[in-house]
Amino acid sequence: MKHIKTLNTKNLKDTMKKGGCGECQTSCQSACKTSCTVGNQSCENK
Amino acid sequence: MVHQYKNNGFNIVLDVNSGMVHVVDDLAYDIIALYENESKEEIVDKMWDKYSKENNFADLKKDYPELSEETLKEEISNIYDEVTKMKTDGNLFTEDIYENYIGSFKKRETVVKALCLHIAHDCNLACRYCFAEEGEYHGRRALMSYEVGKQALDFLISNSGNRKNLEVDFFGGEPLMNFQVVKDLVAYGRSQEEIHNKKFRFTLTTNGVLLNDDIMEFANKEMSNVVLSIDGRREVNDNMRPFRNGKGSYDLIIPKFKKFADSRNQTNYYVRGTFTHNNLDFAEDVKHLAELGFEQISVEPVVAQDGEPYAITVEDLPILMEEYDKLAKYIIGRRKAGHWFNFFHFMIDLSGGPCVAKRLSGCGSGTEYLAVTPWGDLYPCHQFVGEEEYLMGNVFDGVKATGIREEFKSCNVYSKDKCKNCFAKFYCSGGCSANAFKFHGNINDTYDIGCELQRKRVECAIMIKAAEAEME
């Protein structure tokens, strides 16, 4: 019986290894300009 | 930290520190809620008491026909063990191990990678909510000269270290009021790419009034993204986005925006609206834009001080929460019917997305991202322009007020008390510094109404992912 379904394929902790390269888009350059939408950006270093 | 909530028939468990999202049934939901505070025996007994009751057991049987009263206890025990395994595997009840990591990450030597060029402090609309005060930012009308813009690009190149991708947004006021300079700066930027091993990503934010075929053609060749300002339904848009003579802008811009979006193959653009106290039913505006055929939509809450008639108030929040729920259901319905569109504030990537360093270190304002006024002054971001205490320097002499840069550099999720126990901190990165400053005079605070709405959007975005997983 399946009671729990996990949606992710990626755990944030794993991104500590090679994260922080800084090549990704600055969030306010995407669409917002009035809120912080860091979580909406995509990684450039997959 | 674990955040559990129910939305649209889904039981969702977000393990905050790992970002893992689990969709669970009622029984697992209850077990997870008790897991950290009670023993296995206590939880099994409690769950048995609850779920062996006639109605609850009948509900369980609907999903698990093979379940019997004899096997229920064993099943509860199995779920408990599964939760324990998830914890052991680092997918549930994970600890926050990032504070020191982010602390040292923030201390690194930062480079400038993005500029918001205020190409025109002037506007041909007189939007009532404009934080730039009809384009003028508490100051005088002005257009950026080519010389200032060129110096800004040189400043960016020379302060960008090894960063290859450089971002430049042509912003205003209305940048198309100074379009020749935009074109000339793009040409200058392109001429410098090979010399310095850089790649410019130009973007443009426009109200569309001056948009024409030539500008569209140029933008489609040179702009990696365009942001097209429109609030939604005609009456909503025209109420807040009139010309200076009071006439509405909707009828002029809609055909141009539709053509522009199609000419970009419905990608790499946003129609971007602002909702206010005057249109709390903003989901209708999103629907309107979706039904016009736009596939990239962002409609966002106005940020305005109490006292402005259009400001969002605490009393508006329950209505807005419901509206986000309605919008999320509408999006699911559209996707089920094969009519996909993207709502920017519900974007969440559970298979990728930004690294934890990006998520926790803030938006980059004041360090990696700066705004440039028409005369070349530097501010931490476009929203600080005109706040003289935040004047950082200029593009000719560079950043002089290094204390401001340090203030922004040390600002992150862990420097904000209100963020410590917030489940949404990995999605907003501590929120917008300019909003915090405007409401509390301190960038290490947060804009509380914005936080409430952000949390709701994260919940809805995850719920949509759960619904999509069910569709597969």
Image (cartoon, coloured by chain):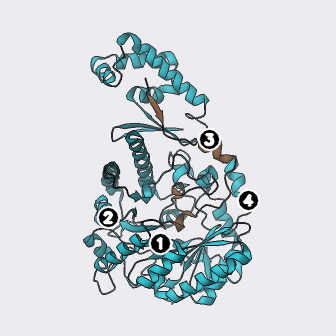
Chain colours: A brown, B cyan
Relative to A33, does residue B154 appear above or below in the rendering? Answer: below
3D distance between C-alphas at marks 1 and 4: 32 Å
Question: Which residue position holds label 1?
Answer: B226
Which kind of residue does numbered mark 3 sit on? Asp
The residue most toward the left is: B235
Which tag, 2 or 1, sits closer to the chain's start? 1
* Callout 4 and callout 3 share a chain: yes
Secondary structure found at label 2: helix
Look at the numbered disc 3 and give the secondary structure of its residue: loop
Q: Residue at x 62, y 58 (%)?
A: A44
**Residue at the disc numbered 3:** B96
Q: Earlier in the sequence, mark 2 or mark 3?
A: 3
Image location of residue B152, percent across then percent down: 64, 81
Q: Which kind of residue does numbered mark 4 sit on?
A: Arg
2 and 3 marks in contact (CB < 8 Å): no
Task: For mark 1, give the secondary structure.
Answer: strand
Distance between mark 2 and mark 4 Cα atoms: 42 Å
Q: Are marks 2 and 4 on the same chain?
A: yes
Foreground disc of the pair 1, 4: 1
Q: Are marks 2 and 1 on the same chain?
A: yes
Q: Chain of mark 4?
A: B
B305 or B114: nearer the viewer: B114
Circles 1 and 4 on the same chain: yes
Q: Amino acid at mark 2?
A: His
Mark positioned earlier in the residue sequence (4 or 3):
3
What residue is disc 4 on? Answer: B108
Q: CA distance from mark 4 to mark 3?
A: 21 Å
Label 1 amino acid?
Val
**Residue B160: x and y, percent?**
70, 70
Could you tell me which chain the residue with mark 1 belongs to?
B
